[in-house]
Amino acid sequence: MLDFYFSYRRVLKRLRSGALGGEMDRLAEHFFMLGYKPASAKIYLSRIARFSQFAATLCGPMPIPQHVIDSYLCTFTTDTPRIGAVSALGHARRVAPERFIGSVPSVDDDPDALLLASFRTICAKCGDLSRRPAKAFFWAAAAFWIGSAIIIPTKSSKR
């Protein structure tokens, strides 16, 4: 299925090597079945292949432990490529869960879950974030960090 997205032999060879090389055709089929445009699928497949090369140097053909994923994500110095890599690896984990060791931490395991739930509640009180995101986020953050000591404009407030 990789042949649908890539035509050069060297590129196909590089994609099919690495820790996830044997799963790349399944991943390409996954993106095709989900209806991803070829350009988007190529980006995801390239990100997964880059991780696959990284993982191959650390664990070879063995299943990939969580610390290898964390090490790879730490190589990114900015958020945008890290977010893209996390998204691509999420697809890889769904398609080939047998190639990974360990699970993604659930919300119950998150030590900040209570804190984030409180922040979401305050954001909901501030109004529709899609209409006025900057103002609502500012009021929610201020109320959250000050401990709700200020008056928060609510959804029913008219301005």
Image: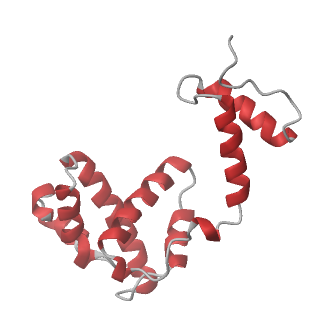
Q: Residue at x 22, y 54 (%)?
A: 34
- Colouring style: secondary structure
Question: Is residue 137 depicted above or below 101 in this figure?
Answer: above
Q: Nearer the viewer, residue 149 or 33?
A: 149
In the figure, is residue 133 to the left or right of 121?
left
Q: Position of residue 43 (x, y in %)?
A: 30, 52
Question: Is residue 158 depicted above or below 142 in this figure?
Answer: above
Q: Residue furthest bottom?
A: 62
Picture quarter with the C terminus: top right
Q: Nearer the viewer, residue 155 or 86?
A: 155
Q: Position of residue 25 (x, y in %)?
A: 18, 70
Q: Nearer the viewer, residue 116 or 37?
A: 116
Q: Residue at x 71, y 66 (%)?
A: 111
Q: Quadrant of residue 85?
A: bottom left
Q: Position of residue 60 (x, y in %)?
A: 38, 86
In the figure, is residue 39 to the left or right of 97?
left
Q: Quadrant of residue 112?
A: bottom right
Q: Residue at x 39, y 68 (%)?
A: 51
Q: Residue at x 58, y 30 (%)?
A: 129
Q: Residue furthest top?
A: 159
In the figure, is residue 31 to the left or right of 119?
left
Q: Residue furthest front?
A: 156
- The number of callouts visible is 0
Picture quarter with the N terminus: bottom left
Q: Position of residue 3 (x, y in %)?
A: 10, 62
In the figure, is residue 67 to the left or right of 6?
right
